[in-house]
Image (tube, rainbow, N blue to C red):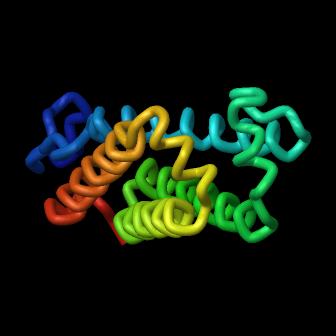
Amino acid sequence: MASDPNPYEPPQAQVADTANSSGRPALVWVIVIFQAIGIIGGLSSTIAALVGHPFGGDAVRPYYEQLTVVDHIVTLIATVLSLFATVSLFQLKRRSLYLFVAVLVLGIANVGVSLAFRPTYRAMFEASGYWSLLLGWGIGVAILLYVWRLHAKGVLRA
């Protein structure tokens, strides 16, 4: 009976804690919440404009009235890309880096085309300043750099 294992004896194998038992980094949570607010705000703003009651009332109505189907498709594509990028980041997927690059490039291209060819769009920023655009791009670049850092450190998975 001496060969019976003692159920109360500690295990002989080394037991180690996992390296990252806490889950996602806190900044990932912050970015996901920030992006979710932006996506919901963008969708609600677009829907309000499409039904004829844009946020900002009569002050922005001339801008929304000149939007075409192409503009709404670009907005939809940017929103969907942003949603996929955000979900991919939440899942810590490598593709989130490329999706955030696509969102930033599409946003800059869209603003560039609008500034070049839409006087009402240009007038809207000339009245209030371009700080909101620069701030938005700055936040986008900061998010992109953080996601790139996660990618470089191997936090993002395939």
Q: Position of residue 104 (x, y in %)?
A: 41, 61
66, above or below 157, in the image: above
Count of number-bearing discs = 0
Q: Position of residue 11 (x, y in %)?
A: 15, 41
Q: Position of residue 94 (x, y in %)?
A: 35, 67
Write the residue at 40% across / 37% down.
Answer: 129
Picture quarter with the C terminus: bottom left
15, above or below 57, in the image: below
46, above or below 70, in the image: above
Residue 57 visible to the viewer: yes
Judge by depth and name the residue closer to the eye, 67 or 51: 67
Q: Position of residue 100 (x, y in %)?
A: 41, 61
Write the residue at 49% across / 51% down.
Answer: 86
Judge by depth and name the residue closer to the eye, 151 or 64: 64
Q: Is residue 103 left or right of residue 58?
A: left
Judge by depth and name the residue closer to the eye, 150 or 10: 150
Write the residue at 27% across / 39% down.
Answer: 25
Q: Quadrant of residue 139?
A: top left
Q: Is residue 9 left or right of residue 37?
A: left
Picture quarter with the N terminus: top left
Q: Is residue 64 left or right of residue 11?
A: right
Write the residue at 52% across / 52% down.
Answer: 122
Residue 94 visible to the viewer: no
Q: Is residue 17 left or right of residue 143?
A: left
